[in-house]
């Protein structure tokens, strides 16, 4: 998925188009999952965190501003934010 297409997908998601979320999941999840897996080093936790990330991208898509940066970079920042706040980690340590 090109960054222009990803940016358009975020715009569609901000308008409430669920088809855009499905498109994002299909097209961008392999890369985003790879980021999560490298961060968490556990496949199950990475899958859970990716689900949290997709939810966050859906609910915050209206905040993406293409004049401030690339869409994939924005997605990765959200992934890192989730990891740094402990989302996607087993609370038992």
Image (spheres, rainbow, N blue to C red):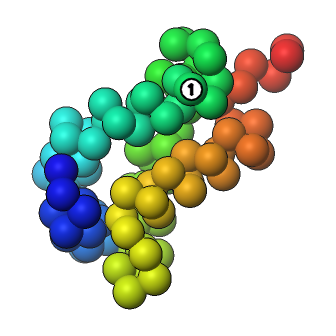
> Who's the residue at 76% across and 37% down the image?
86
In the displayed structure image, the side of residue 83 where residue 25 appears, left or right: left
Crowd class of label 1 (few under 14; some 14 to 19; many from 20; radius 10 Å): few
In the figure, is residue 93 to the left or right of 49? Answer: right
Q: Nearer the viewer, residue 93 or 2?
A: 2
Q: Quadrant of the C terminus?
A: top right
Q: Which residue is mark 1?
A: 38
Please give the name of the residue rendered at 16% of the width and 63% of the height, measured from the top-left corner.
5
Q: Is residue 77 above or below residue 36?
A: below
Q: Is residue 31 left or right of residue 9?
A: right
Q: Residue furthest bottom?
A: 67
Q: Is residue 68 visible?
A: yes
Where residue 88 sits, quadrant-wise, is: top right
Q: Position of residue 2 (x, y in %)?
A: 18, 57
Q: Residue at position x 56%, y 26% from top?
A: 38
* Percent x, y of residue 12: 20, 68
Horizontal side of 90 relative to 38 (left or right) equals right
The reply to whether residue 12 is visible in this rendering is: no
All told, the count of numbered labels is: 1
Circle 1 — which element? helix
Residue 26, position as x, y percentages in the image: 19, 36
Q: Residue at x 55, y 46 (%)?
A: 79
């Amino acid at each position: 998925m090109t960054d222009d297409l990803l940016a358009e997908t975020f715009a569609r998601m901000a308008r409430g188009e669920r088809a855009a979320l499905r498109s994002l999941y299909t097209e961008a999840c392999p890369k985003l999952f790879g980021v999560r897996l490298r961060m968490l080093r556990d496949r199950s936790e990475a899958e859970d965190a990716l689900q949290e990330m997709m939810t966050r991208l859906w609910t915050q898509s209206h905040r993406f501003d293409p004049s401030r940066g690339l869409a994939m970079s924005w997605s990765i920042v959200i992934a890192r934010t989730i990891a740094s706040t402990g989302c996607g980690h087993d609370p038992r340590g």
